[in-house]
Structure formats: C-alpha cells, structure tokens
Image: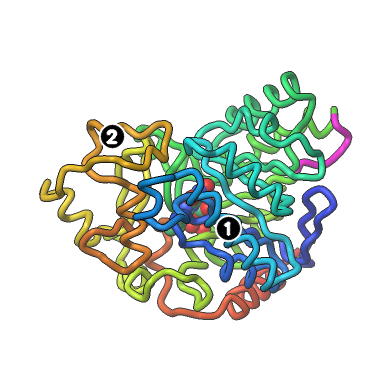
Amino acid sequence: MKIPPLQIGTITVPLPIIQGGMGVRVSLAGLAAAVANEGGIGTIASVGLGDVEDSKHDFDRVSREALVFEIQRARKLTDGPIAVNIMGVLSNAKDLVQTSVREGIRIIVSGASLPLKLPEMVNDDSVYLVPIVSSGRAADIILKTWDKRYGRTADAVVLEGPLAGGHLGFSAEEMGDLEGHALSVLLPKVLAAVKPYEDKWGRKIPVIAGGGVFTGEDIARLLQAGASGAQLATRFVCTHECEVAREFKQTYLDAKEEDIVIIKSPVGLLGRAIRNPFLKNLENDTLEKISCPYKCLATCDVAHARYCIALALSNAYRGDMEKGLVFCGQNAHRIHEIVSVKELMAELKAGIEAYPD
Ligand SMILES: Cc1cc2nc3c(=O)[nH]c(=O)nc-3n(C[C@H](O)[C@H](O)[C@H](O)COP(=O)(O)O)c2cc1C
C-alpha cells in the first residue's frame, strides 16, 4: 500500500502515525521527539508532570512549569510536530492548554470527557484542536457544540476504541461487548458523524483511529476503511526513548494476556492496567487510606477513592511495582522486546507498505 501522509491543518507528516499521549511521565519529550523525527506526530502528555512533593504546595504552578520544561526539551530534540495531550477532567486543563499554546504547540489533543469547552480556551485558528471520542455520537455532540457555540470545527478527531490503554470512554456494559465496539464498527460511525462538518467547512476532518493497533497491517486496514491515520501508545512504552523505569517496561514484557485487566479508576472511568503487586494489594484491600493535597482532577471522588491515581501512576513511572499502577493497552502482552523508536517506526512503515492496495 502506498502510504498516505497525514495532514492536520497545514501540518503534514509522511507516516500517518500519532504516538498517543501517556500521562504521568510515560510520554515525555524524549519519546515524542523521537516519533516526530521518524515521520510521525509525537505527543507529550500534560498530566502529572510536576514533582510530586512540590505539587502538594502549588499544583498549578508546578504542573505548568514542568510542561514548559518538556515542551522546550522536545524542541531541542526535533523540528517535527509535537502535540500536547490534555485530559478534560483536569482541574487545570485550561492553564495547560494555554501554556502549550504560549510555548508554540500547534496540536492539542483532548479526551477523558467530552472537550466541549476546548475552543473557548484557545482563540487561535492556527492551533489545531483534536478531540478524542469513543463513538460517533460523541463526535457528533462535540462537533455540533463547537459549530454552534464557537463557529469552528475540529481539525482532526481521534477515535479511541475499547482495546486502548489508560482511561477508557466505555461503560462496563459496552466493555462486555468488545466486538460490537470494535474499531471496524465504530470507525464508519465516526466518519459519518464528521461528514456534515467536512461539507459545511469545506475541508477534510481526518479521523485517526487507535486502541489495540499493533502492526503496520492493522494501520493499513484502518486506512483502507477510511481512517487518515492511527494512534498507537502501548507499543511505544517498550522503546529505549520512553523514559519510564526499567521495571515498568519489564512489567509489559512479562505480562500475559490474563494479566491485563479492567479497573475502576478514582477518576470515575474504567481503565486498563496490568495486574501487578499494586493491583493485588488493592484486591486484598491492603492499601493505606489516602488524603489529597493536589486536587488535580475535577471528577476525583477523594472521599471514596482507595488510592490516589496520580501518585500510583507516578510510583509506576519510578519503578515501584508495590505502589505503582501500570496502565497498558490490551495488546501489551504481545510485546517481547525493547526496541528503538526508529526500529518500531520502520517496522510499522514496512507493514503498511506490504499491505495490498
Ligand atoms: C500508559 C498509558 C497512559 C495513557 N495516558 C493517557 C493520557 O494521559 N491521556 C489520554 O488521552 N490517553 C492516554 N492513554 C491512551 C493512549 O493515548 C492511546 O490512545 C491508546 O492507549 C491507544 O491504544 P494502544 O495503547 O493499544 O495503542 C494512555 C495509554 C497508556 C498505555
């Protein structure tokens, strides 16, 4: 298959691959820049960047400064396109969006709730806004709201299916019917939802599909089904450039299919993670009671939460598997080695090219 470049606004990349944002320091500047250097779009995840201790005293300032640091670090490593991922449920989402824009970021990707107010935070058409959706209905609601309220549309849409890592946009009932919510089922619905807005605005709104995408062949199939690109995250964890601790990557390498589980996150969403000592402690109810100095999530039910998710994810980043929550996509168990981003991108590219037109 001849590889179609991915275009978002005036930004064009030769490989239609976005490295998905992975919060709490899994996708930092080093990984994002490496992906951008190999012809894709790299994403810095903005959540949980600040030092955990410092964040207790001034969460907003510490988060903001840490994001600036990562964006500037990425800029030193690449001239390629870098996106910033901002979870809509963050209490400081607006600040992070505006900080990214001030630092020259041109692509903002936002999910983990419908980012209905995103255009209000960015009054600049040269900054491309990319909502993450899990259904045609969500795409329709966002595009309709943006159109009516702000007179603008999305510059691309990420469709995240139920095999993705991290927080998921599906209910327990929907997760019980994975086939009914497969990307092949959801993609035509999202394409249909964006079509009226493509017609109205006279331009393409690329749909980028992700969640369980593992090979170049998977990407090629999505492209043939009408996607303009694929978003992959899990595969990028086991690269040299991903800056998590060795133990985090080893958890991926050791994971068997049955170790990959769905959890209820204190954020109020389901999430996918690897059953490690931390999750076993959680099952046995042996975790300490938490208090929350951060107030990082607008939706966190602190009174009933059995752990602080920001802290648990941060512990995983540092390699503490007794106290760390390791998010992953459904296909993490298929990863058997750590490679460079260059090798991974070359493998994916070759896989797309090998697919019949
Ligand atoms: C470790 C990890 C952390 C993630 N963190 C975020 C996040 O902070 N924000 C977000 O929108 N998506 C997050 N995701 C979802 C990814 O961006 C991506 O869309 C999804 O995982 C794609 O599926 P795949 O991992 O099977 O390739 C995360 C995924 C993983 C594996």
Q: Quadrant of residue 36?
A: bottom right
Badge 2, how many Cα within 10 Å: few under 14, some, many 20+? some
Kind of residue indicated by mark 2: Val
Q: Quadrant of residue 158?
A: top right
Residue 58 to residue 349: above or below: above
For the stretch drawn in magenta, the main secondary structure is loop
Residue 173 to residue 352: above or below: above
User: Could you tell me which residue is drawn at 67 percent across and 73 percent down?
Assistant: 77
Q: Which residue is disc 1 drawn over?
A: 44
Cβ of disc 2 within 8 Å of ligand 1?
no
Left or right, 233 with respect to 323, comes to right
Q: Residue furthest top?
A: 148
Give the structural element (helix, strand or loop) at label 1.
strand
Q: Nearer the viewer, residue 100 or 252?
A: 100
User: Could you tell me which residue is drawn at 33 percent across and 62 percent down?
Assistant: 316
Left or right, 104 with respect to 240, comes to right
User: Could you tell me which residue is drawn at 73 percent across and 65 percent down?
Assistant: 15
> In which quadrant of the rendered image does the C terminus lie?
bottom right
> Which region is colored magenta?
201-205
Q: Nearer the viewer, residue 86 or 259?
A: 86
Left or right, 121 with respect to 274, comes to right
Of mark 2 and mark 1, the one earlier in the sequence is 1
Q: Nearer the viewer, residue 244 or 159?
A: 244
Residue 81 seen in render:
yes
Residue 211 seen in render:
no
Q: Which residue is disc 2 drawn over?
A: 302
Q: Nearer the viewer, residue 300 or 341?
A: 300
Whole-angstrom CA distance, mark 2 to mark 1, is 27 Å
Q: Quadrant of residue 230?
A: bottom right
Left or right, 326 with respect to 233, comes to left
Give the structural element (helix, strand or loop) at label 2.
loop
